Amino acid sequence: MDKLVINGQKILNGIVEISGAKNAVLPVMVATLLAPGKYRISRVPDLRDTHTMLRLLEMIGATSSFENNELLIDTTKASNPEAPYDLVKTMRASFYVLGPLTARFGYAKVSLPGGCAWGPRPVNFHISALEAMGAEIELDEGYVIATADRLKGAKITFDFPSVGATGNAVMAAVLADGETVIQNAACEPEISCLCDFLNAMGAQISGIGSEKLTIEGVDQLNPVDFEIIPDRIEAATFLIAGAMVGDSITLKGANPDHLTAVIEKLQESGQEITTTDDSVLINKLGPIKSIDMTTAVYPGFPTDVQAQWMALMTVSDGTSIITDTVYHDRFTHVSELSRFGAWITMKDNVAVVSGRKTLKGAPVMSTDIRASASLILAGLVAQDRTDISRIYHIDRGYERIEEKLRGLGADIRRESE
């Protein structure tokens, strides 16, 4: 098992290339199951989760090749509409196959998901959406079994704008008979990316990017070539690194329109940020101001950047309050950040962070993807050496993060434990 070793307090400068979005490419990969044929997907991040999804697609019967961030998928012979526990337990996004498999084959058997070790994230929204479209759902020994001759258009209203449930419902609806209207749909760029991909295949989806999606079912879709959007969470992580230990960092290939809430908060904290259509530049101007932050669904501040923001506030000039309204249990990084000497107190889903001038390097352990990023950020700003173990979590969501940071001047390396 690998670990990351960081010798902190090195000033970061330069240009970093932002990879394609993990949370966009996974549902797009699954959507290739909707129509048999060959697909070419570019700007695909080389991640542990990408390879896990490829293994799942291959078990269903697809073939693939993946090189230089270009993915070729052939779903012509996909014929096994099942997703086993051994794969789904390692990555919640595997549950995305439920909608496409039911839509294409009239049958799906998908294990209940696992993934990051924090917080309950139920799949009832996914199931109720399929039931509204006429699927019969059975739960059997940890598996969801869905059957339907052909799904039918329906009116679906989510109690909460779940990204996963929205994606699953949209993929099921594109081949349904009639019109489906999804109210309180997730508005995240990754859902818009999925809808754009489906429309390129021949789907008829309107309202993309809004809380109301209207899908007119079609009889057939066709394979296409497609490029994945940039990863806004990776971009936000590098922006925060720039605020903590940077001088001047340019994010190449980022979409600033997807980063509005993060950019605004960083500007409040005293950073200078300028943007173009496909880049973001951050200049560190001085001490970090303590800024309160509350996560929210898009376009609010992303819960996937909550841990990184907390790392930033540990070296701010005062006290800040961080509230996560999306996932109340997403705070496994607090105890690990405290090992650096950070001052953090918790009550329910609210953290109070008292900033310090310096942190001290320490041995710490990754617990999930974004918590891992917060530990890297703390290690970059801390005095002396930091060892981060269980970094397979990092490899699920960040492509070559240590190489990218070294390119900016960080002293970071990967070692075998």
Image (spheres, rainbow, N blue to C red):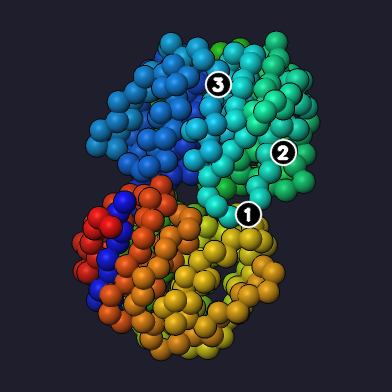
Front in this rendered view, residue 233 or 147: 147
Q: Is residue 127 above or below residue 355?
A: above
Amino acid type, callout 1: Gly
Q: Is residue 356 left or right of residue 278?
A: right
Q: CA distance from mark 2 to mark 3?
A: 20 Å
Quickly name the residue at label 2.
125
Which of these two is toward me, 384 or 197?
384
Label 3 vs 1, first from the N-terminus: 3
Mark 3 falls on what kind of element? strand
Q: Residue at x 24, y 58 (%)?
A: 415
Residue under the point 53% across and 27% down: 84
Residue 387: x and y in percent read 32, 67
Q: Camera-side residue: 114 or 222?
A: 114
Residue 176 drawn at (x, y percent): 67, 19
Which element is circle 2 on? helix
How many numbered marks have been drawn onto this rendered protein structure? 3
Q: How crowded is the residue under tag 3: few (<14 C-alpha within 10 Å), some, or many (20+)? A: many
- Disc 2 marks a residue whose amino acid type is Phe
Horizontal and vertical percent for residue 140? Answer: 70, 25
Eye-nearest disc, 1 or 2: 1
Residue 119: mark: 1
Q: Amino acid at mark 3?
A: Glu
Place of residue 78 in the rendered image (x, y in percent of width and height, measured from the top left): 46, 14
Q: Is residue 218 visible?
A: no
